[in-house]
Image (cartoon, grey):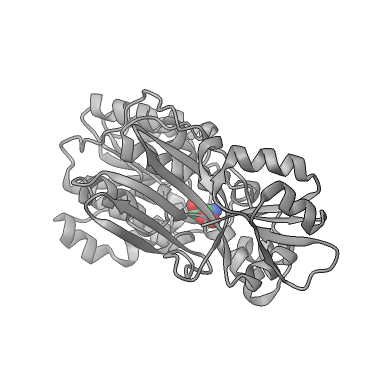
Amino acid sequence: MKIAVMGYGTIGSGVVEVLDVNRDVIAARVGEPLEVKSILDLREFKGDPIEHMVVHDYMDIVNDPEIRIVVETMGGVEPAYTFVRAMLESGKHVTTSNKALVADKGAELLQIAKDHNVTFLFEAAVGGGIPIIRALLESLTGDVIEEIEGIVNGTTNYMMTKMTCEGSEFEEVLKEAQDKGYAEKDPTADIEGYDACRKIAILTSLVCGQQVDYNDIPTEGIHKITATDIQYAKAMGRAIKLLATSQASGDTYFARVAPFLLTPDHPLYHVNDVFNAVYVRGNMLGDGMFYGSGAGKLPTASAVVGDIVELAKNVDKNIPITWEAKKLTLADPLQQRYAFFVRTTADRATVEAVFGVVSYVDAGIAGEVGFTTEVMTQQEYEKKAEQLGEVLQMIRLA
Ligand code: HSE
């Protein structure tokens, strides 16, 4: 069975490596060997063993009837969308690691795949090597999923862990994350939470079967988290983690991406470094957690190759996945309830006049007050914060 890879960057080259290193075991599982025939890239790779496979025009792959499975590891919506669409329309199965593409065009590409009796898979788009998508689509189908909370961005989790354990500075740990191949080329997507936002949009779409627009998900990144916040977190015995959350509410979901303060008994508290974890609560399952390598070359390539094997075993059919283009209206995020940790330069009398009962946190920081509130809606918090003025920081408790 012949395969093409579009994009020979970190993940694409990882896919070729996994297929090579695990060639025999994969062939045994599929029932025949898998062979990479073409690699689409702008570069030439002169002197590289893959040089003879390189093509520069995606139509060379479209027009090659031998190629049955195409891997998309280019990233970004365009031209990936145009290329993937053309592959599906020409009767080739596609697997992608591209969360931007899946979050934006997932429903549409699944429909195109169905119309052409081929399959579109994207296990690597969320949680790197962790099989969370297959778990939701195939294993937890007897459950109503009530809640998903995920640490789904390896870069930011690595950065928060380093900042917490080693007291390292933001810029220094970011560079380390980039050197290790975790961060995107433009780290804004990681740091500002956009990457996590797309991933929770995908997971929520899959559990509700409708299109969740990532633009509707309130998203805060980690760029405002400082060493002082970490001192407060330690004084509370908590850890700060960037969580991507989705919680059932009637017929819809609350969704949010933001840093949260976690207690040690929270299932995600101990998820450190580049590891990802997705905590799922089902109405029959109760609690489940999927944990593992969430970013990086080989873990992500492992998930892509898992999809390739699945596609190769089902080469003559469409594997149905329910994700309709009809947009889901998310629950109003202002009505979601939290307890809040707040830092302010206001005095205690003002804090209590505005927020009523609070618990103060002593982290030994002069010139400001840190406290946690009772549980209230986001809207109530925002109203009170406005009355308080002078808010230095707010982090929700989980
Ligand atoms: N930049 C992403 C991360 C890669 O750090 O998790 C995996 O999607």
Q: Name the one closer to the observer, 296 or 340.
A: 340
Q: Is residue 8 above or below residue 369?
A: above
The single residue placed furthest to the bottom in the displayed view is 166
Residue 43 appears in view:
no
**Residue 216: x percent and y percent?**
52, 32
User: Which residue is drawn at the image coordinates 47% and 35% (left, top)?
Assistant: 80
Q: Name the one closer to the observer, 4 or 323.
A: 323
Q: Is residue 157 left or right of residue 164?
A: left
Q: Name the one closer to the observer, 392 or 93.
A: 392
User: Which residue is drawn at the image coordinates 35% and 61% (left, top)?
Assistant: 290
| Quarter of the rendering containing residue 254 | top left
| Quarter of the rendering containing residue 241 | bottom right
The single residue placed furthest to the right in the displayed view is 367
Q: Is residue 56 left or right of residue 210?
A: right
Q: Is residue 228 left or right of residue 52?
A: right
User: Which residue is drawn at the image coordinates 32% and 40% (left, top)?
Assistant: 207
Residue 228 appears in view:
yes
**Residue 176: x percent and y percent?**
65, 66
Q: Is residue 69 above or below residue 151?
A: above
User: Which residue is drawn at the image coordinates 26% and 33% (left, top)?
Assistant: 322
**Residue 198: x percent and y percent?**
49, 41
**Residue 96: x percent and y percent?**
39, 44
Q: Name the one closer to the observer, 100 or 70.
A: 100
Q: Is residue 289 left or right of residue 314?
A: right
Q: Count of labels shown?
A: 0
